[in-house]
Image (cartoon, grey):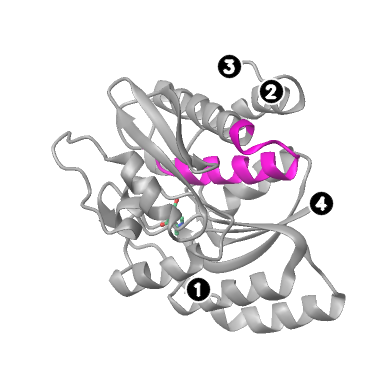
């Protein structure tokens, strides 16, 4: 069983591949990587970060893999270095996803109601085409609103999460919207067999860098371990929430990402045994 993670390397800041690799490996699954860009830190809150787009290296990497006859059971894509990498990911899916394989897209584009640096509305449009090729998409609230063409909720308005999940399912994928803050709870809304379901965890106030990436890596790892959609959501939401609360308690600089490492053992106990909620 192998997962291909297509994502950037932010050298510092615990997101993307520096999160996907340890978490997927801990799940007991091979994590191969296709790096999209190399940055000194992620772009969320650091000044003066370096950014190298790795698009030029990708065709020869893929040509080599083709010669090796590689295929992947899961392809999980995250942060892309530029808009043309969306076509690259589509062709990686076409050429390297095993016939029984699953394609998980985290449409990384923004948070807190805003697009991240380097993203624009053309990217959002094009991201829809990538999402419509996915088996599962994992947008946060900002990305879900962008993809569904809905306004981001202002001043404590409630997100019309059910409507957004319904709208996103018209992209022919299973939408899993993360980080829906509802009072004391933080919910995941998702579509299963034409019904919108909700899974809630405890909410920690504020913004936590890299939380979506921890969720996405754990979710893909759980699916690769044969967990059902519901189980994968419960396990990865529980792991992300414990990591968030540990990070909040440590009260450090949140730009450096989640303290997920010490939560890996409890996560694996649940992954390897019965789900205890
Ligand atoms: O966590 C999402 C993410 C991934 N990669 C890079 C980012 C961000 C969010 O800011 O900047 C480079």
Q: Nearer the viewer, residue 249 or 150?
A: 150
Q: Which residues are magenta?
A: 208-231
Cβ at disc 4 under 8 Å from ligand 1: no
Cα distance in 3D space between marks 2 and 3? 9 Å
Whole-angstrom CA distance, mark 4 to mark 2, is 20 Å
10 Å neighbourhood of mark 4: few (<14), some, or many (≥20)?
few
Q: Which residue is mark 3?
A: 277
Identify the residue shown where x is 34% and y is 63%: 48
Q: Which numbered disc covers residue 1?
A: 4
Q: Left or right of 263: which side holds 28? A: right
Between discs 4 and 3, the one toward the N terminus = 4
Secondary element at image label 1: helix
Q: CA distance from mark 1 to mark 2?
A: 35 Å
Q: Quadrant of the C terminus?
A: top right
Instruction: Please provide percent x and percent y for residue 152.
Output: 22, 48
Residue under label 2: 270
Mark 4 or mark 1, earlier in chain: 4
Kindly report the distance in space between the C-alpha atoms of the residues bearing marks 4 and 1. Answer: 25 Å
Of callouts 2 and 3, the N-terminal one = 2
């Amino acid at each position: 069983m192998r997962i291909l993670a297509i994502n950037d390397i932010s050298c510092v800041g615990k997101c993307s591949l520096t999160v996907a690799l340890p978490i997927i490996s801990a799940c007991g699954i091979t994590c191969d990587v296709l790096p999209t860009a190399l940055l000194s830190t992620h772009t969320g809150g650091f000044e003066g970060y370096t950014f190298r787009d790795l698009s030029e290296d990708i065709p020869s990497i893929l040509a080599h893999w083709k010669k090796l006859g590689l295929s992947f059971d899961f392809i999980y894509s995250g942060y892309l270095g530029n808009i043309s990498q969306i076509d690259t990911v589509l062709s990686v899916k076409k050429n390297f996803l095993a016939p029984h394989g699953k394609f998980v897209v985290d449409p990384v584009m923004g948070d807190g109601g805003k697009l991240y640096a380097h993203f624009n509305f053309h990217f959002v449009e094009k991201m829809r085409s990538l999402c419509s090729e996915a088996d599962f998409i994992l947008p946060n609230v900002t990305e879900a609103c962008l993809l569904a063409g809905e306004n981001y909720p202002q001043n404590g308005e409630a997100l019309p999460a059910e409507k957004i999940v319904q709208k996103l399912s018209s992209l022919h994928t299973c939408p899993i919207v993360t980080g829906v803050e509802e009072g004391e709870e933080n919910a995941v809304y998702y579509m299963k067999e034409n019904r919108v379901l909700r899974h809630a965890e405890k909410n920690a106030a504020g913004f936590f860098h890299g939380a979506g990436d921890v969720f996405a890596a754990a979710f893909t790892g759980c699916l690769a371990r044969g967990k059902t959609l519901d189980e994968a959501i419960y396990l990865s939401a529980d792991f992300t929430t414990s990591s968030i609360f540990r990070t909040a308690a440590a009260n450090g600089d949140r730009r450096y990402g989640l303290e997920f490492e010490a939560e890996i053992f409890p996560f694996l106990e649940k992954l390897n045994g019965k789900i205890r909620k």
